[in-house]
Amino acid sequence: MKFTHLFGIGAIALSVTACTTNPITGRSSLQLANNSEILTMSAQEYKTTLSKGKVITGTADAKRVVNVGNRIKNAAERYYQSIGRSADLASYNWEFNLLQSSELNAWCMPGGKVAVYTGILPVTKDDNGLAVVMGHEVSHALAGHGNERISQAMMAQYGGAILGGAISNAQWASVFQKVYPVGSQVALLKYGRSQESEADKMGLYLMSMAGYDPRAAIPFWNRMEGASSGARQPEFLSTHPNPETRISDINKDLPKALEYYKAAGGKI
């Protein structure tokens, strides 16, 4: 993969104004990277990941992953259309796959490339629990958290040199490869606590818009914590907020989520 256009002069020139506002949470973030290049790389990495793993198809669980994923995708597209931001999702090419693995994990690459591991299904239990997971992971992609992490790494390493245009393509590429390591699973990028919290909130709203009961979120996260107790914490939880903070935040967001759920036909 060539990175010569990933962080070019155009991105540097935009560094002062490249703040992106999340249309669902209202949070602003600095995103300097070229999204089209990130999407291209993500598609390639996703294809490689599927080719090296065992993709489950045709089973009830595999169909559930596709069904829940499509409902969340459709909810996101409807919402973005309603606020005049359909263009944000125009380059997405959604895929939803179930992979055979004992890991308690799920992820979504930029561009809507989603994988759910069979190991997490006993914890999700039902469609509502699965929607909590998939809504959360899709939200990482929609919020541009990968782009944000790359931008944060660049600012931390080079600071004002970025604004002066003194950063070479090789330096941009070096940081990109550290944040999104080529040849490994791009999806395992470690997000920060603020990004995980935003994905919790955004995912809660998206699952509600899709007609899934947001009240399933607290029991799900409690089960995740229970499943990881006494063992090495799974990658899925490695940088997430502590359980007490997460539950407190979800409780604060539930009233609005329930409004979305009721509007989607859910019973309160």
Image: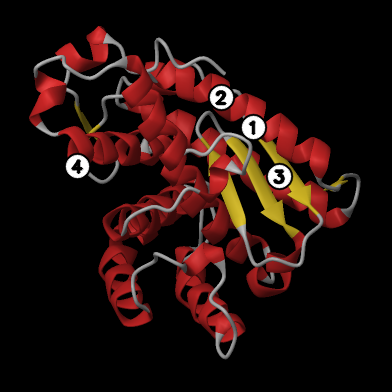
Which of label 2 and label 3 is nearer to you? 2
Which of label 3 and label 1 is nearer to you? 1
Which of label 4 and label 1 is nearer to you? 4
Calculate the distance from the C-alpha at mark 3 to the C-alpha at mark 1: 23 Å
Residue 103 location, x and y as percent?
69, 66
**Amino acid identity at mark 1:** Glu
Q: Nearer the viewer, residue 19 or 52?
A: 52
Of the numbered discs 4 and 1, the one sitting upstream in the chain is: 1
Is the Cβ of the residue at disc 2 closer than 8 Å to that at disc 1? yes
Calculate the distance from the C-alpha at mark 4 to the C-alpha at mark 1: 26 Å
Q: Residue at x 72, y 30 (%)?
A: 47
Q: Residue at x 51, y 81 (%)?
A: 225
Of the numbered discs 2 and 3, the one sitting upstream in the chain is: 2
Find residue 67 and name its label: 3
The local crowd at label 2, few if under 14, some if 14 to 19, many if 20 or more residues have their Cα within 10 Å, is: many
Q: Secondary structure at mark 4?
A: helix
